[in-house]
Each structure stands twice: as C-alpha cells, then as structure tokens.
Image (cartoon, rainbow, N blue to C red):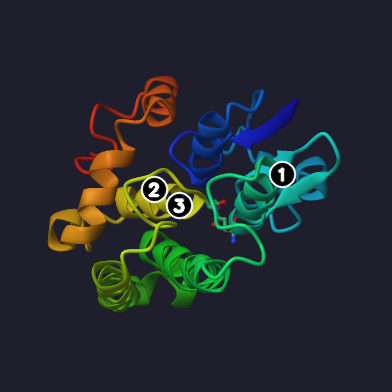
C-alpha cells in the first residue's frame, strides 16, 4: 500500500495520476496545510523542506515529484522508456528540464513575494511569466519536431507532470498557444486515471485544457 501525503490540486495530483494510471493501491493522507502541518517535525521527517508531496512506499518514504515518478515508472516497467533504451537519455533530460526549470519557476509565479519580498512581487511575477513562456515554447518545439513516445497522447509520467503544470499555468501559458502540447493535454484529461482524480478532487471536466 502506498500512502500519498496530499492536498488537492497540488503536486500530489501528479503522483496521484500516476498511481491511478498504474493501478497501484494507495491511501490519501490529507495534509492540514492551513493548520501548519507542513512545518511540523512529523511532516518534515517525510519531506525535509515541508513541501507537497511525500509518498510512503512499501519500502521507504520518498519526496521530490520527479524522483517519485521515476521510481514508480521503474517498478511498474511502464509510463517511461526503460533503462538501456535509446529514448531513456532524452526522456531523463526533459524530465529534469521540467523538475529543475518549469516546476520551480511555476512556484515563483504563484509565490512571487517569497523571492524578493511583497514590494517586488509584481516584478518577480512578470519575470516568472516571461520565463515560463520561453520554457513552454522550448518544450513545444521539441515535441513538434521530435514527437517522442514518452511525451505524447499515450499516458506517461512526463505527460502527466507537464499536464498538471500547464493546468496551473493556464494564465501565462494558455495551452491553446502550444498546439502539440495541447493535443497531449486533451488526450490525457480523458483517461480513466484523470477522470478518477478529477472526480476525487472536484477539478472539473477538462482538467488540463480548461482548468479553472
Ligand atoms: N521540488 C519539489 C517541489 C514541490 C512543491 O513546490 N510543492 C508545492 C505544491 S505544488 C508546495 O509544497 N507548496 C507549498 C509551499 O511551498 O508552501 C517537488 O518536485 O516535489
């Protein structure tokens, strides 16, 4: 049994989509974020920075979204290219592109005051939006040119990761502006896994292409 420490519509959703897609048994452990649960010693034992998500697996506790996705794909042998295949290298590069660039800059866009104080929040947010648009265009060009299997209309760990980030970033980066990515989002939001998560978290009918 997996235990996913979770708040709705957070990075825990990315992990939940993959657990659903793989049919792995899991329980949701709700995090009382408003009650300060992220700062408790008990939660910091699971996630040392007090971020969401954390996943207790049958073997260990894990944090960092990309690490969890990679681990789940490896144990299931699905949703990512296998080690020692030609696609593995590019897949890893774009997985880390996502976790090291898109995800942190998305957090700057949502919490701009954390970067340089409330007085500079507008400027930080504008800069984050411009960076996100550049990153998204880079990703769109790669998908349009390379058409990789591991980021396509077929479910994959990276597809779900990008889809959730694009859900959050629909204002600075509307998916309609990125046709190749939009096609992927439209396919992934109708999978049984996405429908189950959408229903569980009350996220709406078109969770990736028309998020809010
Ligand atoms: N690098 C971490 C980032 C996780 C992260 O930023 N999670 C957000 C939710 S999407 C969070 O915990 N936000 C609460 C906060 O920063 O106070 C990962 O990939 O898991």
Q: Is residue 140 left or right of residue 117?
A: left
Q: Do the residues labelled 2 and 3 touch (CB within 8 Å)?
A: yes
**In this view of the protein, which residue sits in the foreground, 123 or 66?**
66
x and y, in percent, of residue 202 in the image = 36, 23
**In this view of the protein, which residue sits in the foreground, 157 or 46?**
157
Q: What element carries label 2?
A: helix
Q: In this view, does 92 lie above or below 72?
A: below
Q: In this view, does 112 lie above or below 175?
A: below
N-terminal label among 2 and 1: 1
Whether the residue carrying mark 2 lies under 8 Å from ligand 1 is answered with no
Q: Is mark 1 on a helix, strand or loop?
A: helix
**In this view of the protein, which residue sits in the foreground, 139 or 125?**
139
Q: Is residue 2 left or right of residue 101?
A: right
Which numbered disc covers residue 164?
2
Q: Do the residues labelled 1 and 3 touch (CB within 8 Å)?
A: no
x and y, in percent, of residue 36 in the image = 64, 41
x and y, in percent, of residue 89 in the image = 56, 73
The residue at the point 77 percent across, 37 percent down is 57
Q: Is mark 3 on a helix, strand or loop?
A: helix
The residue at the point 57 percent across, 33 percent down is 22
The residue carrying mark 1 is 75
Where residue 60 sits, quadrant-wise, is top right
Q: Is residue 51 above or below residue 4?
A: below
Q: How far apart are marks 1 and 3 (CA)?
A: 18 Å
Which numbered disc covers residue 85?
none
N-terminal label among 1 and 3: 1
The residue carrying mark 3 is 161
The residue at the point 66 percent across, 63 percent down is 83
């Amino acid at each position: 049994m997996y235990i996913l420490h979770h708040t709705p519509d957070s990075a825990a959703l990315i992990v939940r989509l993959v657990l659903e897609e793989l049919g792995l048994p899991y329980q949701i452990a709700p995090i009382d974020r408003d009650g300060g649960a992220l700062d408790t010693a008990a939660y910091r034992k699971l996630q040392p920075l007090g971020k969401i998500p954390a996943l207790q697996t049958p073997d260990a506790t894990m944090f960092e979204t990309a690490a969890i996705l990679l681990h789940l794909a490896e144990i299931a042998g699905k949703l990512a290219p296998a080690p020692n295949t030609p696609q593995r290298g590019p897949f890893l590069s774009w997985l880390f592109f996502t976790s090291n660039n898109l995800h942190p800059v998305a957090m700057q866009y949502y919490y701009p005051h954390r970067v340089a104080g409330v007085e500079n929040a507008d400027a930080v947010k504008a800069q984050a939006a411009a960076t996100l648009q550049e990153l998204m265009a880079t990703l769109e060009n790669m998908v349009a040119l390379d058409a990789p299997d591991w980021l396509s209309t077929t479910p994959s760990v990276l597809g779900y990761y990008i889809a959730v980030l694009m859900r959050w970033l629909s204002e600075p980066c509307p998916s309609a502006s990125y046709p190749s990515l939009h096609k992927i989002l439209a396919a992934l939001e109708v999978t049984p896994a996405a429908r189950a998560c959408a229903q569980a978290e009350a996220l709406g009918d078109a969770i990736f292409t028309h998020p809010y």
